[in-house]
Amino acid sequence: MRRRLVAGNWKMNKTHLQSEEFAEQLKEKIQNPEHEVLVCPPFTSLHAVKKVLKDSHILVGAQNMYFEEHGPFTGEVSPLMIKEMECTHVILGHSERRSHFNETNEKVNKKVLAAIQNDLFAIVCVGETLTEREHNKAREVVEVQIKECLHEVSPEHMTSIIIAYEPLWAIGTGKNATPQQAQEMHAHIRGVLTNLYTGEVARNIRILYGGSVKPDNAASLFAEQDIDGVLVGGASLEVDSFVDIVNA
Ligand code: PGA
């Protein structure tokens, strides 16, 4: 059975002091969650947040990383550094990384392989633009992203992969995909994974939906059979809205 995951992507928000205080509040309000809960603060907050959430039911992950373990890569953060902070997950290939920092599927793939090497769960983000959807290209675009981002990932290592379907037109716009649109794409992704791997791999992998998830639409998304959780941006920045989504 796939356990649902509610993941908060804080993006470039909250200083380490703000993060620490926020984590204290989350810890108090999220005691025995039915779903798996993960927060992904900025790098500068990871240590502080992990310290607060150490004995809680809330997991901590990073929003990005580089694929090399160390070396002359000014400004980058390595899988080893994330791992040593006892982070369990890393978000890779978020559309903001792709659009503002030129991340290609090829680069995302290198990061995915590095995450696996370092026993980190990789949350691999895929999703189409509005133009691609309007031109009936959404399924194809997502298929290519999946294939290229998972290049050379063995079937055994697919247990370290979580897919996040985040249509670009839904991110930060307040306009979420309908549960039906998301379900349709998630089923398509499972089909792609069945062809690439096996039916078992496709059945076992968790596929999250992301893009304007709010307390009032979370339950209807969770109700779809192929939606195994959500990746939440804006609504993860307020304690009450994040907790409401966790409880949805
Ligand atoms: P949003 O962001 O919930 O603010 O739309 C989601 C994401 O980018 O992961």
Image: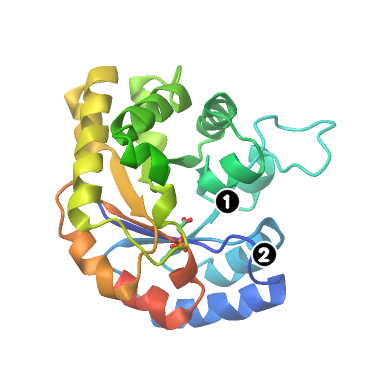
In percent of width and height, residue 146 lies at 39, 29
* Point 36% across, 63% down: residue: 175
Q: Which mark is residue 158?
A: none
- Residue at 33% x, 77% y: name it: 244
Q: Closer to the N terminus: mark 1 or mark 2?
A: 2
Residue drawn at the location 35% of the way across and 34% of the way down: 159
On-image quarter of the C terminus = bottom left
Who is closer to the viewer here, 215 or 18? 215
Say few, some or many: other residues with alpha carbon within 10 Å of mark 1 (under 14 / 14 to 19 / 20 or more): many
Q: Is residue 248 visible?
A: no
Residue 185 occupies which quadrant of the picture?
Answer: top left
Mark-to-mark CA distance, 1 and 2:
11 Å
Residue at mark 1: 63
Between 8 and 89, the residue placed more toward the observer is 8
Question: Which quadrant of the view contains residue 126?
Answer: top left
Look at the picture and state if 142 lies above or below 181: above
Of tags 1 and 2, the one toward the viewer is: 1
Q: Is residue 7 visible?
A: yes
Asked if residue 41 is positioned above or below residue 136 in the image, the reply reads: below
Place of residue 85 in the rendered image (x, y in percent of width and height, measured from the top left): 64, 53
Q: Is residue 25 left or right of residue 208?
A: right
Binning the other alpha carbons within 10 Å of mark 2 as few (below 14), some (14 to 19) or many (20 upward) gives some
Tag 2: amino acid: Ser
Please name the residue that numbered disc 2 is placed on.
Answer: 45
Dot 1: element: loop
Instruction: Please give left or right for residue 159 compared with residue 22 in the image.
Output: left
Q: Nearer the viewer, residue 51 or 202?
A: 202
Numbered circles on residues, count: 2
Q: Amino acid at mark 1?
A: Gln
Residue 104 horizontal/vertical position (percent): 57, 30
